[in-house]
Amino acid sequence: MRRTILSAILFLMASLVAFGQSAPADARQDPRQDLRDTRQDNQTVRSDMTEMKQDRVDLRQDVKAGDKAAAAKAQKELRKDARDMRRDEKKALKDRKADRKDAKADRRDARADRREAVVDRRQMRTARTGMAPHGGHR
């Protein structure tokens, strides 16, 4: 009887320690880091748009002035900015999808941990009362 109670207490303690180490640390760090990454991606997109607008202005001015070399250079920069913008948009979309997938996995893990805690509590209750799982005495 003592061995059963002691093993049940050790099992409960181990499961509580495992639950405490896995769930809260992941849940607290990921959303903040994801938010920072999203803000950084948005800032990058805004800066690319600003550079693109400035390159268009430079291109128009060079065309009006008749400076073909500067116009060609401005055209190259404009195309490069457009490529960078598309790449950044794709990266931002990919990051958002990954963030949603990670959040879903975190929620699923938290649900599983809660279920395990309920099962552990039930097992401890039955071990403490001395009742067998079918309801009879031991």
Image (cartoon, helix red, strand yellow):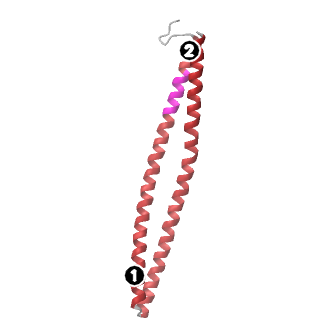
Which span is picked out in magenta? Answer: 112-121
**In the rendered view, would you say 8 is above or below 111?**
above
Query: How many residues crowd mark 2 within 10 Å: few (<14), some (14–19), many (20+)?
Result: some
Disc assigned to residue 75: 1
Considering the whole magenta stretch, tell me its main secondary structure: helix
Residue 86 is drawn in which quadrant? bottom left
Report x, y in % for residue 111.
49, 34
Residue marked by disc 2:
127
Query: How many residues crowd mark 1 within 10 Å: few (<14), some (14–19), many (20+)?
Result: some
Report x, y in % for residue 76.
39, 79
**In the rendered view, would you say 93 is above or below 6?**
below
Sequence-wise, the earlier of marks 2 and 1 is 1
Q: Please name the amino acid that badge 1 sits on.
A: Gln
Report x, y in % for residue 104.
46, 43
Question: Mark 1: which secondary structure?
Answer: helix
**In the rendered view, would you say 49 is above or below 68?**
above
Residue 17 is drawn in which quadrant? top right
Identified at 43% across, 68% down, the residue is 85
Residue 126 is drawn in which quadrant? top right
Report x, y in % for residue 40.
53, 61
Disc assigned to residue 37: none
Q: Please name the amino acid that badge 2 sits on.
A: Ala
In depth, the one of 83 and 4 nearer the eye is: 4
Identified at 52% across, 53% down, the residue is 34
Identified at 53% across, 65% down, the residue is 43
Question: Mark 2: which secondary structure?
Answer: helix
**Left or right: 94 in relation to 114:** left
Identified at 59% across, 34% down, the residue is 20
**In the rendered view, would you say 81 is above or below 30?**
below
Residue pushed farthest bottom? 66
Q: Is residue 71 magenta?
A: no
Q: Is there a contact, CB below 8 Å, between mark 2 and mark 1? A: no
